[in-house]
Image (cartoon, grey):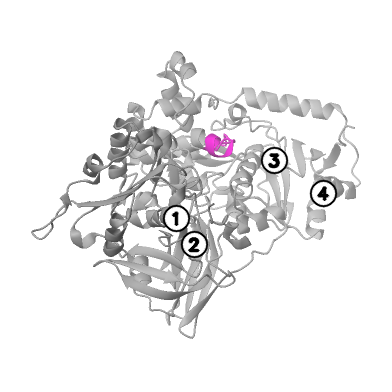
Amino acid sequence: MSLILETPAAAGRPAMQPVAARVASIIKETHDTFTLTIEPPEGDPVAYFQPGQFSMLYDFGVGELPISISGDPERREHLTYTIRSVGQVTYQLVTRKPGESIAIRGPFGSSWPMKEARGKSVLIIAGGIGLAPLRPAIYHVLRHRGDYNRLVVLYGGRSPRDLLYRKEFAAWGMLPDTQALCTVDYGGVSWRGYVGVVTTLLRHVRMQPTETIAMLCGPEIMMRYATRELESRGLPPSQIYLSMERNMKCAVGFCGHCQMGPYFVCKDGPVFPYTKMKPYMDLYEL
Amino acid sequence: MRKKLYRLDRAGLSSLFDVLKQEGYLVYGPTLCDHAIQWLPLSSLDDLPAGWTTSTAPATYRLLRDSAGSLFHYWTGPDSLKKVLHPARACITHAERDNGSFRIWNETPQPVKRAFFGTRACDLAAVTALDRVLLQDRFEDDIYKANRAAAFFVAVHCTSSAPTCFCASTGTGPQARSCFDIALHERSPQEYLAEPGSASGSAALEKLAAPLAPPEWAKELAESCTHAAAAQQRRIDLNTAPVVISLNFDHPRWDHVAKRCLSCGNCTSVCPTCFCVNFEDHTSLDLQQAERLRLWDSCFSQNFTYIHGGSIRLSPKSRYRHWLSHKLARWQEQFGTSGCVGCGRCIAWCPAGIDITEEIAALQTTTHAAAMTGVSNHGN
C-alpha cells in the first residue's frame, strides 16, 4: 500500500502566501549544485509532498523560484531540494547556512504516476539536474519494492564532475532487480564509464515495453529523443511521463508565463503523460 | 414576472450617482484625461465626458466633439476595469529581517466598495472572463477577489458601434446581458432607461422613486442594439478559430504580421482580459525590509519565457502567434470561455495598426473547409 499522503492544498493557506522555513542542512553535491534540506514550514507539523511536485522557494529580497523536491516523500521531518546555482536566487539559496531562514510556498503541481506503475517495471531517464525531481520516485519504488517489477535508472550528465548523488547512484546499481547506468557527454582521461547521450544506454536495458512505465526529466531535447527511442522500442506513449520546464512566476496559473499550448505547466504539470505533450513537443517556439 | 424598467431624466441619473455615493461606493466613470477617455473616480456626473465622442481605427484613437451632448456617445478607451480590479502594480508580500532570520507576510487585501458607472457589454464580458481565470479555477487571486466582491456595475448599452468594435461576433455585445447591477440606455442626454440586473441594483433604483418606463422602450433598445450589431465592420469567427489556429502553426501569415509587430505589448496592456503578471523584489537601503511587487506583464517581452539556457519564444513572430492563439483558441481549451471580447482596443492601440480580426481571417481563408471539419484540434 502506498503511504504517500494526499497533499493538502498548501495546508489551506492562500496560494500566494510564502511561509518561513528554517534551513536544516546543506550538502555540496557538485561544483555548482547543492542539496538543501529545510524543516517543515511554520505551522506544518510534517513535510508532505508527492514525488514530482515542486515548491516555490523565496529568499529575502532576491525573489522566488520553482524548485522540485528531491527527497524521500516518506521522510516527513524535512523537505529536500537539489539546486544548481545558476542565477541570483539560486546562488543566494545555496549559500544559506543551517539555522537561517528561507520562505516557501507549495508543494504544487502534478506528480509521477506511482499508482499507475504498480505491478510494472519503472524506467527512469534523467538528464542533468533532471535526476533531482525523479529521486523521490526512485525512493518510493525502493521503499515499496514489492509493488513494482524492475527498476531501471538511466542518467546522463555533461561530465563526471557534474554527476549528482554518485554514491547513492552506485548503491542503486547493486540492488536486486535494479539497473542504474550513467553516461556523460565528455568523459576525460580518467572516466571508465559510458560516453554519449542518455538514449544510448537504452540498448543495455532489459525490459518488457508493454509492462513498463517510463518517467523522464531533463533538457527538452533529451526528452524529445528519449520519447522517440522509447516508442521505437515498443513503449506505448500512454506509458511515458515527462516533467516539463517553463518560466514560472506564481505556480498557480495566474502569471501566464508557463503556458505550453493549452496547458499551464505549473498547475496542469509539471508531470504530463506523453500523450498530452506529444502534439506540442516538436513545435519550435510554441 | 417581468423586470421593472425605470425612466430616469438627467436629474434622476444624478440621484442614482448620489445613492451610490451614500451607500459608500467610490464611483468610477469614464472621464477626459490625457487626450483619451479613461476610468477615474468621479466627483459628480459632471465629470463624464458630455459632448465628446471618439473616433477609432487601426492605430488611431481621437477625441471629437459631439454636438448632441450625449454622456455616453463613445466607446472603449485605452483602459478597462482590469486597471482597477486587477491592478497593474500591487505589493503582495512583505518581509522584514528579524534576528538573523526574517518574518514574511502578505497583507490581506481589503475590499473597497467601487461602482463603475458606464461599463460596456464587452468590458463586463471581460470581467466574467477574468472571474473564470482568477476566481473560479483551482486557486483564488486575493486582490482580484477583494476588488471584485465589492464592485457594482452600472452598464451602458451600446446603441452604435465604433469601427473597431466586433462584439457582435464574439457574442459579448453591444447590449449588456449579464454581470451588471443596473444597465442604462441613453435615449437622449436627458432621458434614460434603467434596468436592474441584481438585487442591489433593484434596491438602488427603488430608492430613486423614478417613474416606470413605457414597455416599448425595451423593444426600441433591443432594436437599436441589433442595428449597432449589424453596423459592425469587423468580425471574428470564434467557432472555427481554435481549429484554424492549430492547423496553421507554420502559416506564412505569422511571418507577415511579425514584420509589422513591434513587440511593444500595447495590445496586452489595453486588453481587458490579458491577466499575465510578473514579480519584482525591492529591498530597503539598509536591507532590513523587502517587498515583492506584482506587475502586469506582457507575453510580447522576450524575458517572459526565459528559462536557464534562453527564452522559449525568441522571435516576435512566435510571441504574436502565442498571444493570438491564446486569445482565440487556448483560452477556450483552458477556461471554456473566449479570451477575446471584441472590444477592439488592441486594434486601435497597436502602433502598427495590426488587426486581430484581419489576422485570424487571413488564416481562415487559406484553411480548407474540409480540413477544418476533419480535425478537431491539436490537443485531442
Distance from the alpha carbon under mark 1 to that under mark 2? 8 Å
Q: Nearer the viewer, mark 3 or mark 1?
A: 1
Q: Judge left or right: residue B379 versus residue B83.
A: left
- Labels 1 & 2 near each other (Cβ < 8 A): yes
Is residue A112 visible to the viewer in this orientation of the structure? no
Residue A162 falls in which quadrant of the image? bottom left
Crowding at mark 2 (Cα within 10 Å: few <14, some 14-19, many 20+) = many
Q: Residues within 10 Å of mark 3 (few under 14, many from 20)?
A: some
Q: Disc 2: which chain?
A: A
> Over which residues does the magenta segment extend?
B331-344
| Membership of A156 in magenta stretch | no
Q: Which residue is mark 2?
A: A74
Which residue: 59% across, 47% down?
Answer: B80
Q: Is residue B84 above or below residue A82?
A: above
Disc tally is: 4
Mark 4 lies on residue = B200
Q: Residue at x 53, y 27 (%)?
A: B236
Give, as a three-letter code, the residue at label 2. Glu
Element class at badge 4: helix
Characterize the local packing of mark 1: few (<14), some (14-19) or many (20 or more) Cα atoms within 10 angstroms.
many
Q: Which mark is residue A140?
A: 1
**SS at circle 3:** loop
Q: Which residue is mark 3?
A: B69
